[in-house]
Amino acid sequence: MSGSGSSGGVVELRVHGVSSTSAEQVLGLEQTSQVAGDRSGGFYRASPRCSHTSGAQGVALEAYRWGDLPSGTVARTLALVFLLPFMLANVAIWMRPANPGSEAMVKSLCRVLALTLTALYVLAAAGVALDLLAWKCMTSSGCLAGRSWFSWLGGQSTGLRLAVLALGPAAAIGLLWRLSNRPGRTFEAFRAPEREVSGLPLGAVGQWDAEPLVGRLRSIHVAAAFATLDVTLLAARAASGASAGTITLVVVTGVVLAACVVLLCTPPLIDRGATDRRLDAITTTLRTTAIILTVVVVAHLLANPAPWRTGGALPGYEAILACVFVAQTTLLVALGVVLLWRRDRRRGATPLFGLGTLVMVAVAISLAVAYSAELVYRVADFLDRDAPTGEGIVNGPPWAYTWAIFGFFRTVLFTLIVVGLVILVSRRGRYRAAAAIVARDHPDPPAEAEPRLRQVRQVIARALFTEKLVPLAVVFGCLAGLGTATTTIGLLGLFPSDVVERYAGVPSDVVTFAIAFGSWVIAAIILGLVIGGVFAYRTSQFRRYVGVIWDLGTFWPRAAHPFAPPCYAERAVPELTRRITYLVERGDAVVLTGHSHGSVLVAATVLQLPPQVGSRVALLTDGAPLRRLYGRLFPAYVNDAVLQEVGDRVGWRWVNLWRDTDPIGGWIFSGHRPGEMATVDGPAMTVDRRQRDPRGVVTPPGDSIPPPIQGHWGCESDDRFIRAVRELVERLGATAGPRTDPP
C-alpha cells in the first residue's frame, strides 16, 4: 500500500513500546487505516472517515505497530517459552563489555556454551526415549503393563528398540531445525537497501544480513546434535565390547564434534558477511556428514550381533551427561576469568561488574538444565505411577539430574532470601529519597492530600528498586553457575541427601523433600511461563509485564544460538528506515517518537538514516530505557558514543521525557531536575526533561479523583507531550527549509 496524506508537511511517526498497543490507542483515534506494511508490522493513519486526522499544529499522525512481530500467534508465543534458554544464551553474547580486546574470546566461549545447550536438549530427549523407554521400561513387565501403544517393542532385540526409539531425539532435532529455518524466509522480503549507516555496533542491528551467520550456526548445531545422539548410541553399544566398527564410528563422531567446536572458536571466519560464502560449504558438509553418520550408527546397532549388557541405566548415558555439565562449568569459569581480566577498571565504568554476559549465560544454562531434568523426572514419574512396587523404572533418572534439580531449587531459594534482605535493607533509603522528591514536587500540601502523597512515595520507592536489580542479577547468575557446577558431583555416584547429611548435618529426609519440591517448582515455573505466554498474546494489559522478556530478548539478532527465537529488529528497523526516507524524500519532515522499548528501535533507526534524511528528522523519547537498562545490560552497543551520535544525526532535535515514578525508563544524558544544573555540557544538556508525576495530589475542581500516576506508561494526549512535539516541529521548521540534495 502506498502512503497517504499531503507532502511538504510534518509527520509525527509514533513507535509504541512492549504493550502491543493497537494503532487506535497509539494515535488516540477511534478509526485508523493501514497505509504500509502488513498485519504483523504496519503503518497506520487516521481513517478518512475520522474527523480528527492531525496532531499538534496540524501535524499528520502516523503509528508504526510492531507488537505482533515478536509474538504474533499463540503457537509462536508458546515456542518462545520452550526456547527461552536458547534466547537467553543468544542475548548473552550481546551483553559483552565494550572492550574490543575481549570480543573474540567472549564470542567463542558464548557460542561453545550455546552449543552445550543444544547437546543438553538432545540428551534430555535421549534420556526419555533411549534410557527410560528403550532400556528400562521395555525390560520391565510392570512398566509395560497396560501400555499397548509401545509394549510391542518389549520383546524385540535391544538394538532394534534403540534404533526405533532413536527416531524420537532425531525428530526433536528436526523440529528445532525446521523452526529455526522458517523465520529467515519470512523476514527476507523486508531487508533494507544499503545506506550510509553509522559505524557504531548498534547501527548494524537490522542492517546487516544475519541469515548467513544463522545458517552457519544452524548447520554446526544440527551436526553437533546428531553427533551427540550418535555418541549416546555408540556408548551403549561399546559397553558390552567395542568392535573395530564401533571404535571407528566413535572416532568419526568425535571428529565431527571437535570440528563444530573449532568452527565456533573462529569468529573472523564464521562472522563473515553475506557475500563471503566460503565457510557455508564447510558447515553444510559437516551437517550432511553428521546426518549420514547417524544413519550408519543406527544400521550398526541393527547389524552388530554382539550381545548387549542388561540391567541398570543406559550404559554411558550418565557419564556423557556429566561430561556436558563438567564442560559447562569449565567454560563458565573461563568466561568469568576473561570478563574480569578484560574489564574496564575505572570506578563505575563497568556495568554489572563486567559480568553481564556470564550472568545471562549462567541463567540460560541453569534454566536449560532445569527444563531437561524436569522432563526426564516427569516422564519417569509417569511410567512408574501405575507399576507395582519394585517393577517400575530401575534406578530412576540419572543422579546428575537429581543434582540439577537440587541446584536449581537452592539457587531460587537463596536468591529469594537475598532479594528479601535487599528489599528490607534498602527500604529506608529508597523511601527517604522518595520523600525528598515528593516534598520538592508538592510543597505545602493540604492535610487531606496525605493518603495520596503516601501512595506517590510508595510508587517512587518501588521505581528506585530497579537500581538494586544490578547486584541481584549478579547474585542469581553466580548461584546458577554454582548450581550447574554441583551437578558434576553425580560423577562420584553420590546422592544429594547423603552428601548434605554427611557434611552439613541436615537430615536426608529434608533434602529429599527439597528435591521433590524443587521438581514441582520447576514444573510450576514452566506452566506459569506457558500461561503467561497465552495471556500475553490474548491480553494486551498482561503483555505489558511479561512482554518485556520477549521483546528485549528477540530484539537482538541470532549471533550465538541459531535455535533462539527470530529477531524482529531485522524487519522493524529497516522498515522504519525505509518509511522515514520515503516521507522525507516526498517533502515531509518527521518527528519520530518512541515510547519505552520503542525508543531503542528509533535510536537504531536514526543510526541508519542517511545524513540528508536525518537533517529533516526530530526525535522524542518517553519512558526510554536506553541509559537505565540497555546502557547497563549492553554496554558495547548502548553507550555515550552511541547516544551522542544519535543526537548528532538529528541535529540535537531530541527531547527525552522521564519521570521518577517510572521503574523502567529514565534520563539519557543528565538526570537533573528543574532548578538543578545539568551534569553534561553542550547540546546534550537540553535533551532530558523531567516530568512531575503525578501532576497534583489534590482532586481538581470538576473531578472526583486526583490526577493519575503515569509511571512508565506514556500518554501522547498529555499537554506536556504535545508541547514537546510542537517545540520539535518549530525546530524542524527553523532548520529544514527547502530540501537540497548534497553534491
Image (cartoon, rainbow, N blue to C red):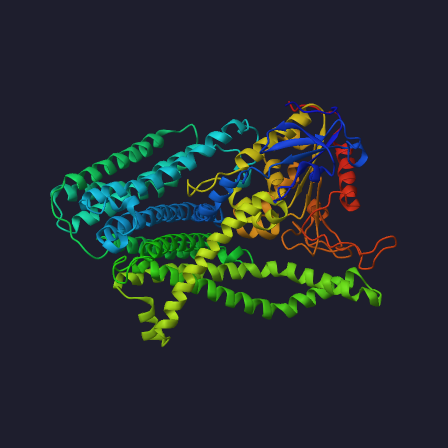
Asked whether 189 or 616 is in front, the reply is 189
Quarter of the image where the C terminus is located = top right
Up the image or down, 332 lies above or below 153; here it is: below
The front one of 95 and 682 is: 95
Question: What is the quadrant of residue 451 in the picture?
Answer: bottom right
Q: What number of labels is visible?
A: 0
Image spot of residue 217 (x, y percent): 38, 38
Residue 496 lies in what quarter of the image? bottom left
Report the residue that reaches farthest toward the front.
146
- 248 left or right, relative to 172: left
Q: Is residue 111 visible?
A: yes
Q: Is residue 634 visible?
A: no
Residue 75: x and y in percent read 49, 40
Is 14 displayed left or right of 141 in the figure?
Answer: right
Quadrant location, the N terminus:
top right
Please tell me which residue lies in front, 384 or 191: 384
Residue at 27 percent across and 58 percent down: it is 392
Question: Which is nearer the eye, 306 or 608?
Answer: 306
Task: State which quadrant residue 706 falls in.
Answer: bottom right
